Amino acid sequence: MANLNETAAWESGVYRIETTDPILGGETGTANIQAKQLANRTLWLKARADQVDAAAAGYGSLQARLATLQSQVEAVGADMQNVEQAAVLEALMQARTALGMIDALRIGPWQQQGGVTIANRGVVGGCVVSKSTTAARNLNITPGRVFANGRTYVVLEGTNAASVPPNTGSGAVTVSAYLYPHSAGDWRLAVTAIGQSVPAGGMEIYRLTLPANSTDATDPNLTGVTLTDVRRIEADWPELMSSPPEAQVLLPRALRSSGYRLHLEPVAWSGPQDRPEVQVASRASNGFTLRLISAHDAVTLRWGLQKLDD
């Protein structure tokens, strides 16, 4: 991975990325223009800071050298004092300006960017899971419909559709009952193994708590197993979503306030061909929350943040 070429120069302004700009990388790409300008400023300020450090010479600090100069000035005549004082004041003014600009750069202009993916899938209706009464440690599911990839799929009724793993340990564990796309075109029920998560592309609909020593021999009817319904139900999908999916983004570096500008660019999604609709649900100094308000699924966004003042 290459670094940007930096030049010690004070840029007169910082380029504002427009909504119509293509996001291009490379040395002169629009995605790197602002970073390059701020890097040039930083290198310029670093050179000024090095000059301030050099002015301190072997005294440890600029203040210590100034104190020494003051004592020397007091030991000479009035004319010499005026010359020395003028030089000292000039050095102080330059040091004050350089340090102020360095501090302004540190707490002022910020630019950050990153990516996030928002999944949008759930249950339109049905898909109720229950314990089987005809087979040991099995689950039944009622027929229903689910939505994913921007469209709906059928879930057929299933008796003894999935089995629950035994828990031979000394403590309770949690597993997930989930739906997954089958090659036949419908979605079917499965249960994760202990210690495993729902696979990519799956949709968790129930959470099962297995008590200690829950096996075919000790609990064939799952009497001690607790089923917790975690279905996201959107009965009016895709016309209306009562609980639109959200994604929380934590900033790589927190700011002092939430008064920053966000640019969102969808780069990939499944579902309708038109661009997904995403809005900023909330923002804070250390992050923000995005809300998907269209029927798209697996929406990958690139986000850019700008804050040019404190």
Image (cartoon, helix red, strand yellow):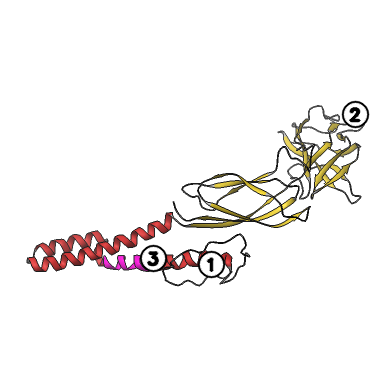
Q: Amino acid at mark 2?
A: Thr
Circle 1 crowding by C-alpha within 10 Å: few under 14, some 14–19, many from 20 = many
Q: Amino acid at mark 3?
A: Leu
Q: Nearer the viewer, residue 254 or 41?
A: 41
Please tell me whether residue 150 belongs to the stretch shown in magenta.
no
Q: Amino acid at mark 1?
A: Ile
Q: State yes or no: discs 3 and 1 in contact (Cβ < 8 Å).
A: no
Q: At 42% from the left edge and 59% from the top edge, which residue is drawn?
A: 105
Q: In the picture shown, does residue 168 fall above or below 278?
A: above
Quadrant in the picture for residue 50:
bottom left
Is any atom of residue 164 visible in this view? no
Q: Which residue lies under the disc numbered 3?
A: 45
> How many numbered circles are shown?
3
**Which stretch did the figure color magenta?**
46-56
Q: Which residue lies under the disc numbered 1?
A: 33
Please tell me whether residue 47 belongs to the stretch shown in magenta.
yes
